[in-house]
Amino acid sequence: MKIIIKNGHIIDPSQGIDGVGDILIEDGKIKEISTQHSALSTSSSAHRTIDAIGLYVLPGLIDMHTHLRDPGFEYKETIKTGTKAAVKGGFTTVCCMPNTYPVNDNASVTEFIIRKAAQEGHCTVLPIGAITKGQKGEELAEIGTMRNEGCIAFSDDGRPVMNSLMMRRALEYSKAFNVPIISHCEDLTLSEDGVMNEGLLSVTLGLKGIPSEAEEIMVYRDLSLSKLTGGRLHIAHVSTEGSVKLIRDAKKRGVNVTAETCPHYFSITEDAVTGYDTNAKVNPPLRTERDIKAIKEGLQDGTIDVIATDHAPHHMDEKLQEFDKSPSGISGLETALGLSLRLVEGGILTMGQLIEKMALNPARILGIKRGTLQTDTNADVVLLDMNREFTVEVDRFLSKGKNTPFRGWILKGMPVITISKGRIYEWQ
Amino acid sequence: MLNRKDLLGIKELSKDEINLILDTAAGFKDVLGRDIKKVPTLRGKTAVNLFFEPSTRTRTSFELAAKRLSTDVINFSVPTSSVVKGESLIDTALTVQALGADFIIIRHSSAGVPHLLAKKLRASVINAGDGTNEHPTQALLDAFTIREKKGRIEGLEIAIVGDIIHSRVAKSNIYCLTKLGARVRLIGPPTLIPEEIRGTGVEVFHDMEAGLKDADVVIMLRIQMERQGKGFFPSTEEYSKNWGLTAERFSLAKDDAIVMHPGPMNRGIEITSEIADGPRSVILEQVTNGLAVRMAVMYLLAGVKR
Amino acid sequence: MRGRFFYGVKMPKELMNKKDIDRALTRIAHEIIEKNKGIERLGLVGIQRGGVHLARRLASKIKDIEKKDIPVGLLDIGFYRDDLNIRKEQPVIRKTEVPFEVTDLKIILVDDVLFTGRSIRAALDALIDLGRPAAIQLAVLIDRGHRELPIKADYVGKNIPTALSETVEVHLEEEGLEDRVILEKVDTER
């Protein structure tokens, strides 16, 4: 099967391409790429020719931080629905967190996810294994075996490894398999049962606050442990100004660290919680304008390498509860690109830099040959129409999770075609 | 006018709305002084006390307020533990509404529950205390009492003493009294007064004597014994020594200062009996005024067409 | 405002002036004394707000004649209205202050305008909740007809036939206005 994408504005930071050109796809692989200086060598008949005039042609996005909820919480999301939502959002690869039931802390669960994703997934699914058995922070999980089965990173996401010695061991041991340890930085003894950012707003809403320091203390600890061990540390969902500063400083000192943030941490503040909107309950919590500014700076100067979604779908009934009882999380796959494109619009990032944060850098951190349009790689391609606006309507979400604080937002820039796993998805 | 379906908190109210409630309450207080203490005003209406937290005082006050207005009252007490196992909050509330409730008076240990119900229900939701957020009718009755005793609220120096961070009474009082033009001082240990609260326009004192100086009104809060084990203060004895209201300390306030307490009191801990039962204590009048204020709130909310 | 100018034309007409009102009240004062053979065990109760001012004026006139004080009370009928369930806004509650025991007294209820009779019905209920008067009589400045309840005034300043589309307004000095009674025709055609 041959596909030709013609006259699109190709952006591929991995090859330094930023210009109008054509792409030839053959049998699910990128066969050839041309820019205005050189035409495609094979102009032979294609099964499908896509006219991409006025569209951006981008490598498929990679989400380093997704909750697919499968196995165990299929009422929240399944591999099938989650990957469909991903593809609609422009992602062709998602890395799923291990807090399923059972927890992905052994090779049989990894194998189950990979097999199911191969059968039902609309995009590539790369599992992230648990650092410790049952995410309990007590005993190391079989990182090597899971690595062989297909896990590309390890994390106890949502349940930080509180024991510093255990975290040290994880960072040391994982070096043998060259996999990153992704850390959800939260000092649970300090955040206790907090449910939102600590500040005047939490006081006036009567909600228990989580100070920024609960994140920053652990960021500092993990940076120290990474320095001590040389282990590869990736800090998940950075939400505070202090964390950005700590990471920036550590990078200068040569610490082996990378970091991600999520669209909600640079798009909205704690004010979204006003009125007790559980859709704005997320962990780490939404912070302040000051933090947003720092995160944007961190994205701009490279302190923050990646924009991930932390897609955390929940059932409507779970969100329709007491604020402190409701689970944390935002269904993010279908809004992440639209929200992140606001950074390009606002002059924070160039389109090329955005694609680095959402495709190339994740691939590099995970050591996978994706997030690129180089020849002979998988043909994961997204065609983006920057002139298309869409309103965030949860009823049209393909994800089962309708939990988003962005309901009703008008976002600019919509994928019109996603090519994933050899299939062409066209979106209206 | 009070153009709202629900009373969720003082935060949401304007100064004019607060004054309207207080003025209306004065009319109802007249009624409470008569032989026939009941008016037919809200005949045929139904109020449900939906209490997820035990509270005899507030529940009884709302119950009597409703009865004085000729409204039928049902008490629906839900121990939180059975709710955890059983039906969801929303289902419980919808069930109560289906019984024909016009007013749902709710107390819950989680902040924001009245707001959630207000969005989902046709009935008027009255917040009778939600977590550490607000307890609006308590603040209204406190303001009513102060106004009655002092003739005004604007310009008064009002000290609130104790566990501010966990106190919904303190929060509602801060909003209410500052909106009405009083100067509010908070007194207590730093562990119980979050720094950020200065953003509401209050003054913070950690020294009891300094905070009480020349106060017109002193509102004492109940200290929860269980805070001791959580590191907020080392012992109730130490707390009492530093922040308990004694006659000696109370003498630092103005000569005509009054003392208030939302109850139930821990005598000998946050307040001595000498003060609580003394001539400048208005603690029992607060209880009576609570009825008038709650009648006024129900009366005013009933007027909004839905 | 434009709409009102073209379509909602108000045509005010003065029914009573300051002198008319004063004469009517003087007459009512005499009638009250005559009918009750003096003012023994008599009390005046004005309905908030217009009725209160009129009750005070009547009390002063009665004092001029009888050289004796007659007690005056203020009654708010908000709690007793029968339209609380259909109103958009709750009526503002004003003071009820009846500083005397109503039981076994003859009470003259005073209001400015008698119309459907519903306010008087509410006032009767309110009064009876305060005690058990020996008798209740009704004095009004204007009776404009259109009764919906079997209620009749004992003393009337002036009977004025009106249409339902008209409004009658009693302006009193106590409210900062010039004493007069005005009939307004509201053209409801729109």
Image (cartoon, rainbow, N blue to C red):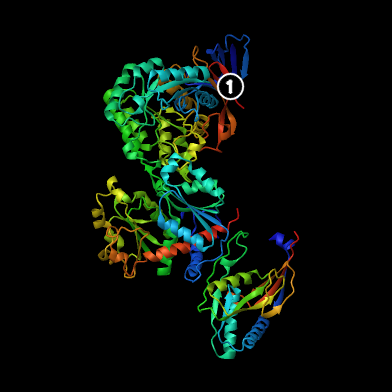
In the image shown, does C113 or A334 lie closer to the viewer?
A: C113
Residue B29: where, in percent of width, then height?
48, 67
Give the chain of mark 1.
A
Residue A293: where, in percent of width, then height?
42, 38
- Quadrant hosting residue C64: bottom right
Q: Judge from the rendering whether residue A116 lies leftward or rightward of residue B223; answer left or right.
A: right
- Quadrant hosting residue B139: bottom left
Residue A8: where, in percent of width, then height?
58, 21
Tell me what residue is drawn at x 46 percent, y 62 percent. Answer: B291
Instruction: Look at the picture and state if B63 lies above or below A130.
Output: below
Q: Secondary structure at mark 1?
A: strand
**Which amino acid does the dot numbered 1 rest on?**
Tyr
Q: Judge from the rendering whether residue C119 lies leftward or rightward of residue B265; answer left or right.
A: right
Residue B224 visible: yes
Residue A50: where, in percent of width, then height?
61, 18
Q: Which residue is mark 1?
A: A425
Instruction: Look at the picture and state if C118 lies above or below A98.
Output: below
Q: Judge from the rendering whether residue A366 lies leftward or rightward of residue C42; answer left or right.
A: left
Tell me what residue is drawn at x 65 percent, y 69 percent. Answer: C118
- Quadrant hosting residue C10: bottom right
Instruction: Look at the picture and state if A361 lies above or below B283.
Output: above
Tell me what residue is drawn at x 62 percent, y 60 percent. Answer: C87
Number of numbered discs on residues: 1
Residue B152 visible: no
